[in-house]
Structure formats: structure tokens, C-alpha cells
Amino acid sequence: MTTMEQRPAAGAPSAADRADRVAEWAGPSRTPTDGPLTFEELQLAGRNRGMPLEALRYDITPTGLHYLLVHFDIPAVDPAAWRLSLGGLVDRPLELTLDELRERPSQTIPVTLECAGNGRARLTPRPLSNPWMFEAIGTAEWTGTPLGPLLDAAGVRDDAIELVFTGADRGVQGGVEHDFQRSLSLAEARRPEVMLVYAMNGLPLQPQHGFPVRLVVPGWYGMASVKWLRSIEAVAEPFEGYQQARTYRYKTDADDPGDPVSRIRVRSVMAPPGIPDYFSRRRLVDAGPVTLGGRTWGGRGPIQRVEVAVDGTWADATLAPVAGDFAWRAWSFEWDATPGPHTLACRATDAAGETQPAAAPWNYQGMGNNAIQSIEVTVRPTP
Ligand SMILES: Nc1nc2c(c(=O)[nH]1)N[C@H]1C(S)=C(S)[C@@H](COP(=O)(O)O)O[C@H]1N2
Ligand SMILES: [Mo]
């Protein structure tokens, strides 16, 4: 495990500058498959929990119910020794302690995070990675300091085009050893809601969510919100690191460079009504009036329309007030449940007219699957 203490001294080439090929670690084939769930997927699913869909009831997801995605290991970071460096193409390089960061102006905003791989396991053939269904979501109140003013303090030079964010976690993916790193254009990084976060739901970040400091990029899929942040570097060339150029791409096949994944696609999810069967998760509902409900979100601002289908007939749902530009929005729908089997579905449409597709938009890495969710229920007569 890499700790801050093991980092090379300033000036020495940092571990982050190395992206070594580790040929013997290329691992098993990750060609998408129609086969049964693999051991490797099970191993990832056990580490990276999802949010149980009944937790859609909470405006703010309790921290222990928020989804989790950790590529490598949760790194050990000593908060007293921790420094955030802001360097590269800047006039005044900065080294900030945790206290210095916390003393800066702060803001708290509710932000819905979703993993870009959410829905991957519903694709056929199934891309091999964390096998998410619908549950790689959560909304927290994130507290931190906006990044823009810090960039001004450091004096980012005119020839810089991007910022590279480096986490303290390191591992091997696709046979390449690297630190988890992502970049953002300066224009994105300067959005007022992009911030360096040290608290989640009013408490210091938990280790698994990026303690002591993470980036939060509202509106983007989760991979942009780099956890365990240790450095920010202004660069003059597009960043080509593994997590930027090789993955988080909408690719048609293994060799397609693909388009980068960025903003969250429009989506709605329903909290399954009634009670579940333990193993199949099939739902049992009593006949009569049933309030269906869930949440809707997308990376381009609050969603204005959700429809619900009962056995294929669509009707508008009622939307709750907007809770924030980057937070999900609750919706509800009154259903008079009649005995027998039924199929329920929901679909959101954003202000630009983007809507959820009936069929999954297949891509090689299983990114951005916002296909409509449908739920099978059995309604039993009320006694
Ligand atoms: N350093 C680092 N940052 C990271 C990751 C990671 O593995 N390492 N995972 C990313 C991905 S893919 C997602 S979806 C979000 C998940 O954030 P959460 O675990 O707090 O929900 O963190 C992102 N930030
Ligand atoms: Mo993710």
C-alpha cells in the first residue's frame, strides 16, 4: 500500500508520472459475455456496494447507504501529514494543509453521484467490470471549498488547458500500473459548484469516500470526482492517463478509442413497491391504491418530466420541488392496483428533450446505460 510517507520528495519524479506496463498482470479476458457471473465480478460487487433502492425515499442518502466505487485499495492517508499540491503551469505553486483548506470559504450543496457503469449488468453481452444493475447512485450534502478561487490564488498560466487530479490510490488496470488520475478542462474546473470536499452529510469524509479530501464535479458521472486527492497539476496537453484515455469511453469494441464519458445521462428510478421475495426480488403488492415513487436526475439540470407506465400505458407522474441544480428530484404516481401480474416502468425527459431509451445503448465498457427500468409485480386481492 502506498502511504503519503512513501511518496518521493518534491522534485523527484513522482509515482504518478510512471504508468508501467505490468505484462504478467494483464489478467483474465474482459471480453463482454453472455455467460454466468464471473468470480471477478462477484469479488468487485462485494467490495463496491450499491444503494438499496428503498433508500430512494431519502432526499439525502445516509452515508452508509450511499453507493461506493473503489478501483484499487482504500489508501491509508495520515491527515496531519497530508498536503494538497497545486502545481504545474502556475505562477505560485501551493501546498495546502487540511486546516488551510478548511479555513477557506466553504459551500455545502446536495449532489447526486452516479457511477458511469450503473446498469452495466443489464447489457447483453455483459461488459466485465463491477456488475451494477440500478443501484450505483446516492445523493449527499457535500461540503468543501470551490476550486476556482484556489486556481486564481495559484495563478494558472494561459498556456494551461487542463488540470490533472491525482488520488493517493494506486493499482494495475488493463496491465498498466498507475495512480487513479483524471483531468478536467479549466472551464469545467472553474464552474462554481466544482469543489474540494472534506465533509459528507455534515461529517468528515469516511475513508471509503475519499478522506481527507476529494474532488466533487456535480453533473458528471462519478469517475470525475477523484477521491483521496493529493495533487492538482495544470498542464498544456490533453491528459492521456489510463482512467482518461483508456477507460470511461463510449467504445464499440476493444480497439475503438471511443468518446469520453462526461455528464450524467437523464434517468429515473422507481423504489420497488410492496414487499420482495428474498431471492428473486420479485414484488408482492396488495390491491388498491398504491403510491409509486422514486427519483429522477441528469447532468444538465433538474428534470421536469417523469412518466410512469403500468402495463405499457404511460401517464405523467407528479414531481416534488427541485432540491438543487445537481440533486435528484422526487416523483410520485398514484396507482390503483388490480389483482394479477403487472409491469411497472418509469421514464424521465430533460429540458433539452433527452429521454430514456427503451433498449440499452450498448457499448464495450457498459457506460451510461440509462435504459428504462421496469419492475414485475404480483398484485394480490386485499382480504
Ligand atoms: N482516487 C479515486 N477516486 C475515485 C475512484 C477511485 O477508484 N479512486 N472511483 C471513482 C468512481 S468510478 C466513482 S463512481 C466515484 C464513487 O464515489 P463514491 O465511492 O464516494 O460513491 O469515485 C470516483 N473517484
Ligand atoms: Mo464509477
Image (cartoon, grey):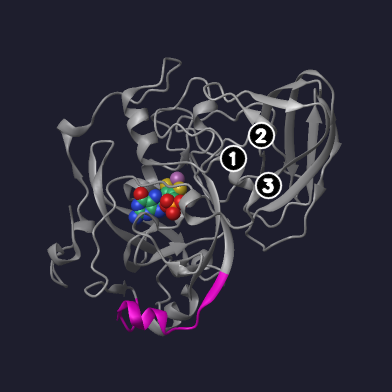
Return the residue at label 1. Answer: 53
Ligand number 2: quarter of image: top left
Residue type at numbered disc 2: Pro
Disc 1 to disc 2: CB gap under 8 Å: yes
Q: In this view, does 255 lie above or below 262?
A: above
Q: Which of 134 and 234 is in front in this view?
A: 134
Return the residue at label 2. Answer: 272
Q: Is residue 181 magenta?
A: no
Residue type at numbered disc 1: Leu
Magenta residues, start to end = 90-108
Residue type at numbered disc 3: Arg
Q: In which quarter of the image is the C terminus?
A: top right
Does 255 sit left or right of 355 as displayed? Answer: left
Tell me the SS state at disc 2: loop
Q: For the residue with label 2, is its CB less than 8 Å from the closest atom of ligand 1?
A: no
Q: Is residue 93 magenta?
A: yes
Residue positioned 45% across, 57% down in the render? 225
Q: Earlier in the sequence, mark 3 or mark 2?
A: 2
Instruction: Point out residue 319 in the picture as x, y percentages from the top left corner.
Output: 79, 51
